[in-house]
Amino acid sequence: MDIQLKRGLLDVCVLASIKNEDSYGYQIIKDMKPYVEVSESTLYPILRRLEAAELLNVKSAEHNGRLRKYYSITPLGLKRIEDFKNEWNEIMSIYKFVTREEKEGE
């Protein structure tokens, strides 16, 4: 898969994982696992990039004597998810066009 495409897909997956509830790194990885494998070394740069783009907010809170970063989605992050849904419809249309010859030839 094209690295840029995968990067964009992972960004949206991370945003979707915190869409309904604030979360932290390890929990995000667990939530995404049934759909896509992502390692800590992949996730944390994504989280920093999304924070820099103002698609999510970060706050620290103590948990078992340690500080844990919690991530929450911003209105821009929610808009990015909606934009992705619209883009996906276009991607599916292109996919149907590209694979139409295979279906017609079967």
Image (cartoon, helix red, strand yellow):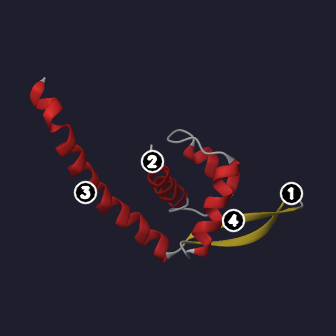
- Could you tell me residue 98's position as x and y percent? 21, 42
> Which amino acid, by three-letter code, is at mark 4?
Tyr
Residue 2 badge = 2
Q: Is residue 58 left or right of residue 89?
A: right
Mark seen at residue 64:
1
Label 1–label 4 contact, CB within 8 A: no
Instruction: Find numbered disc 4 in the image and state the secondary structure of the residue it sits on.
Output: strand
Of the residues under marks 4 and 2, which one precedes in the sequence?
2
Question: Observer-nearest residue: 80 or 3?
Answer: 3
Mark 1: amino acid: Asn
Label 2: which secondary element: loop
Residue 23 in sight: no
**Pointers 3 and 4 in contact (CB under 8 A)?**
no
Helix, strand or loop at label 1? It is loop
Q: Which residue is mark 4?
A: 70
Mark sitting earlier along the chain (1/2): 2
Work out whether mark 1 precedes mark 4 in sequence or the reverse, and give the earlier one: 1
> What residue appears at the point 33 percent right and 59 percent down from the top-left corner?
85
Can the viewer see residue 35?
A: yes
Q: Check residue 90 in the rendering and tell me which mark sits there, or answer none.
A: 3
Q: Is residue 33 left or right of residue 93?
A: right
**Label located before the other in sequence (3 or 2):** 2
Q: Earlier in the sequence, mark 3 or mark 4?
A: 4
* In this picture, residue 12 sits left or right of residue 97: right
Q: Quadrant of the C terminus?
A: top left
Which disc, if any, is residue 78?
A: none
